């Protein structure tokens, strides 16, 4: 019973064994061929009286996520098939690569803010900012290959709600 419960929990969490299902929002990525997610920060520089630059703060830049993906007619992962069988929720398991491609372009065109799950981590508040299809006639007859760029959207709260959250953080000692 314990093993079945562990497997069911892993499937529900999008994990089976050591594998994580790669997803952009609700879209299952069949093949992740490349991933780059550089993180950087900008140091502020302001001139002072003598012309020297004062560097008094550092601001985290939004994360840019670069993925090279393939969308196919069939889920190529064991996890997707087991997940569909155990949960009764096939999700994008039955979508054709054309439907998956259309969903990806829909996310970009309608500026959806999504979570992106990779083998390394989950990125929150991401938006598809570029889709660069890879056209290779030898490989594109039954799949959609593309370089996809996603950018982090940093949201700020202002007004009363922002003040309430700031007060809670201050009261908790953070």
Image: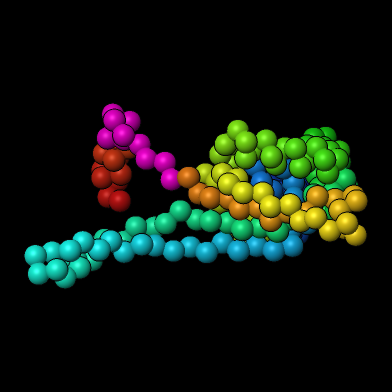
Rendered view: 100 above or below 20 = above
Q: Residue furthest left?
A: 49
x and y, in percent, of residue 133 in the image: 74, 52
Residue 105 lies in quadrant: top right
Residue 95 lies in quadrant: top right
Measuring 66% from the left and 57% from the top, which residue is drawn there?
A: 67
x and y, in percent, of residue 128 in the image: 60, 45
Number of callouts in the render?
Answer: 0
x and y, in percent, of residue 93 in the image: 83, 41
The residue lying toward the viewer, choosing from 34 and 108, is 108
Q: Is residue 162 magenta?
A: yes
Measuring 88% from the left and 45% from the top, which residue is drawn there?
A: 73
Which residues lie in the magenta part? 154-164
Residue 103 lies in quadrant: top right
Rendered view: 55 above or below 130 = below
Q: Is residue 90 magenta?
A: no
Q: Residue furthest top?
A: 160
Measuring 30% from the left and 44% from the top, which residue is drawn there?
A: 169
Q: Is residue 66 left or right of residue 21?
A: left
Residue 3 appears in the rendering:
no
Q: Is residue 31 left or right of residue 24?
A: right
The residue lying toward the viewer, choosing from 38 and 124, is 38
x and y, in percent, of residue 130 in the image: 62, 49
Q: How is the image coloured?
A: rainbow
Residue 33 appears in the rendering:
yes
């Amino acid at each position: 019973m314990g093993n079945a419960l562990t497997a069911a929990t892993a499937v529900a969490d999008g994990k089976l064994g050591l594998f994580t299902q790669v997803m952009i929002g609700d879209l299952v990525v069949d093949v992740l061929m490349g991933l780059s997610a550089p993180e950087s920060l900008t140091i502020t520089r302001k001139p002072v009286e003598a012309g020297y630059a004062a560097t008094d703060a550092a601001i985290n830049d939004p994360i840019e996520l670069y993925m090279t993906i393939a969308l196919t007619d069939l889920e190529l992962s064991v996890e997707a098939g087991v997940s569909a069988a155990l949960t009764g929720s096939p999700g994008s398991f039955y979508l054709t690569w054309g439907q998956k491609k259309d969903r990806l372009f829909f996310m970009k065109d309608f500026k959806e803010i999504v979570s992106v799950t990779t083998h390394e981590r989950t990125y929150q508040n991401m938006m598809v900012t570029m889709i660069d299809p890879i056209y290779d006639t030898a490989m594109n007859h039954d799949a959609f290959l593309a370089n996809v760029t996603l950018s982090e959207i940093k949201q700020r709260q202002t007004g009363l709600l922002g003040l309430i959250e700031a007060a809670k953080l201050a009261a908790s000692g953070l």
